[in-house]
Image (cartoon, rainbow, N blue to C red):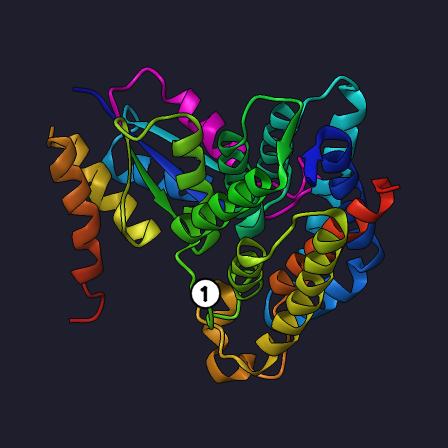
Amino acid sequence: MPYMDDATFRQLWRRFAALVHEHKGELNDLDAAIGDGDHGSNMDRGLAKVLDAFDADPEGGLRSDAKLVGMTLMSTVGGASGALWGSAMLKFAASLPDEPEVSWAGFVQALADFVAALETRGGAVVGDKTMMDVFIPVTEGLVASSAEDQTALTQALERAREQARQASDATSVLVAKRGRAAYLGERSVGHVDPGSRSSALWFQALLESQAAVSP
Amino acid sequence: MTIGLLIVSHSKRLALGVVELVQALAGDELALVAVGGDVDASAQGLGVNAAMVLEGLDQLNGVDAIGLIGDVGSSFLAASAAIDLGDLGDRVQIIDAPMVEGAIACAMALAMGSSFSEVIEAGKHAWEVHKLG
């Protein structure tokens, strides 16, 4: 049965950091169209600090690493992203058992709790042109997916990556209801939400981190 | 009961300006703290995060209750994340008020010795006070 251990969890965040770094300019450009233009730089800076924190604590531990990610993002990433990713990761950590590894079902449950925390904190729903347009449907898809073996899990994660990418693209036609972009109203149509794009990169990292450690 | 006010802005200078104005209008013995992004002091520049809000709340640890007034958007996300993180829900209340007018209204209520709930109401009432007639 597939599971998530600390090495894979760290790999996920290393891959996410690399993807955000690679797409920093694109994320900044998306944000410049409807926000203040720093989403890529902001996330890149915070994720670099996460990797520093991993390096400073080689022992780690799944639950303590999840908490470390939350605290680091909350204190280094400004704006809505830092508060949302940070506080939701703390909820994610609280949802994990204090064990070296968690079953895949346990990981997906923690992810569902992460999404619930995002909903509580930010109040955004599907259609508001935010990261929730990616996280809500893709997490629901993972909850409903079978992951009885590594092949099934990889297929589920490939679907999740595709669904996340499409959901992010689809934010282009939406009118922003949250954050600074909401002040633009109809003028926000035609632009992809940067928070949805970085969220799609997270699901890409989730797939690629599994691939990196699987035999 | 002692009450303090925390002004949370994307800009430290804006928050300090509100504190300066409020102290001039309502008295400089009030417990007032400003937090916000400082382009000269941090790589982040403008913007506010939960850690900054927690530091500000910590500076007010001598008071029994804290009213928090923010500027726009994510200052409230950072504030509510900080309150959760510090488990300060009993002591800290986010006040839904326009930052400048609300801070003045709250501080005037404080200077008159009002209760915490009256201070919060004074801040909310600032939305209703029009500037032209």
The range drawn in magenta is: B36-65
On screen, residue A19 versus residue A4, left or right, reads right
Disc 1 target residue = A178
Image coordinates for residue A26, horizontal then vertical, percent? 77, 66
Q: Label 1 amino acid? A: Arg
Q: Residue at x 69, y 53 (%)?
A: A202
Subunit of mark 1?
A
Pick the residue in front: A74 or A187: A74
Say what secondary structure mark 1 lies in. loop
Q: Residue at x 51, y 59 (%)?
A: A140
Q: Is residue B107 magenta?
A: no
Residue A135 visible from this viewpoint: yes
Image coordinates for residue B130, horizontal then vertical, percent? 19, 65
Q: Is residue B55 magenta?
A: yes
Pick the residue in front: A98 or A29: A98
Quadrant housing the C terminus of chain A:
top right
Q: Count how many numbered circles sit on residues in the image.
A: 1
Pick the residue in front: A14 or B30: A14
